[in-house]
Amino acid sequence: METNSLSQYEQNKENIEFILIQLAIALNELSQKITRNLQSIQNSIQQKSLVFQQIIGWNYVREQNQLNLVASEITSILI
C-alpha cells in the first residue's frame, strides 16, 4: 500500500511539474505577445506624434508666411 502511495505521489509530482512547465511556457509566450503589442503601440504613438509635429510645423510656416506677406504689404504702403 505504501509503495502504491509513493508511486501515486511521484506520478502527481510529475504531473504538477509538467503543468508548471506548460504554464511557464504559456506565460513566456504571453509576455512576448504583450511586449510586441506594447512596441506596436509605442511605434503608433511615435508616428502620430510625428504627424502632429508636422501639422504644427506646417501651420507655423503658413502663419509666418502670412505675417511676412502682411509685413510686405505694410512696408510697400509706407514706402
Image: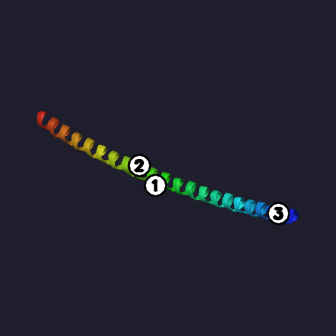
Query: Which residue does the numbered mark 3 point to in the structure image?
Result: 5
Q: CA distance from mark 1 to mark 3?
A: 57 Å
* Disc 1: which residue: 44
| Crowd around label 2: few <14 · some 14–19 · many ≥20 (10 Å) | few
- Above-or-below relation of 42 to 12: above
> Residue type at mark 3?
Ser
Q: Residue at x 64, y 61 (%)?
A: 26
Give the CA separation, mark 2 to mark 3. 64 Å
Kind of element beneath mark 2: helix
Please state if 9 lies on the left or on the right of 30 as rendered: right
Residue shown at 84% from the left, 64% from the top: 7
| Quarter that holds the C terminus | top left
Q: Which residue is mark 2?
A: 49
Residue type pointed to by label 2: Ser
Quadrant position of residue 31: bottom right
Viewer-closest of 13 and 22 = 13
Marked residue nearer the N-terminal end (1 or 2): 1
* Contact? badges 2 and 3 (CB < 8 Å): no
In the displayed structure, does residue 56 sit left or right of residue 32? left
Q: Are marks 1 and 2 in contact (CB under 8 Å)?
A: no
Q: Toward the viewer: 42 or 56? A: 42
Q: Measuring from the top left, give residue 74's x and y in whole percent.
A: 15, 36
| Residue kind at label 1, given as amino acid type | Ser
Q: CA distance from mark 1 to mark 2?
A: 8 Å
10 Å neighbourhood of mark 3: few (<14), some, or many (≥20)? few
Which residue is most to the right?
A: 3
